[in-house]
Image (cartoon, rainbow, N blue to C red):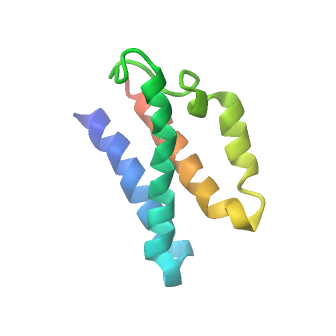
């Protein structure tokens, strides 16, 4: 229960707080863009079983690989990709929190 609250709380609350603080004028669009980064979870469809509550997605799924995470960090540098990168990094961080509570 605590794991689910922490996991989904991080996935939704952190992007909302980031949008409200750093993208005050366009917070709704910023929040939606960061939530759209949930699409990286489509790589879970490649796993068998698709969902395993005891599996850490970091390092297991292709879009959660260390190579992909490094790419997401580099996406923080250009201003044009920063918002998407923030969503991706927040998503990965949320998954790390989830893994640490297993």
Q: Position of residue 77 (x, y in %)?
A: 77, 58
Residue 32 is drawn in which quadrant?
bottom left
Q: Residue at x 45, y 66 (%)?
A: 31
> Is 32 rendered above or below residue 94?
below
From the top left corner, tell me how far across and down residue 100 is, in percent: 45, 28
Which residue does the image show at 45% across and 19% down from the upper left? Answer: 47
Residue 51 higher or lower than 77, as above or below: above
Please identify the residue farthest to the bottom as the structure is shown.
Answer: 25
Q: Nearer the viewer, residue 70 or 38?
A: 38
In the picture provided, is 21 more to the left or to the right than 48?
right
Q: Nearer the viewer, residue 24 or 52?
A: 52
Q: How many marks?
A: 0
Q: Residue at the top extreme?
A: 48
At a point 48% along the width and 27% down the height, the residue shown is 57
Front residue of 46 and 1: 46
Q: Where, quadrant-wise, is the N terminus in this rendering?
A: top left
> Could you tell me residue 53's position as x and y percent?
32, 22
Quadrant of image for the C terminus: top left
Question: Looking at the image, is 72 positioned above or below residue 66?
Answer: below
Foreground of the two, 86 or 38: 38
Q: Is residue 52 left or right of residue 94?
A: left
Q: Position of residue 54 (x, y in %)?
A: 36, 18
């Amino acid at each position: 229960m605590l794991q689910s609250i922490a996991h989904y709380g991080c996935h939704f609350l952190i992007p909302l707080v980031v949008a409200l603080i750093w993208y005050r004028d366009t917070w709704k669009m910023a929040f939606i863009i960061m939530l759209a980064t949930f699409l990286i979870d489509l790589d879970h469809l490649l796993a068998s079983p698709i969902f395993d509550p005891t599996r850490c997605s970091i390092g297991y799924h292709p879009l959660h690989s260390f190579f992909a995470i490094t790419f997401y960090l580099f996406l923080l540098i250009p201003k044009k990709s920063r918002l998407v990168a923030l969503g991706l990094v927040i998503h990965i961080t949320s998954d790390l929190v989830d893994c640490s509570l297993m």
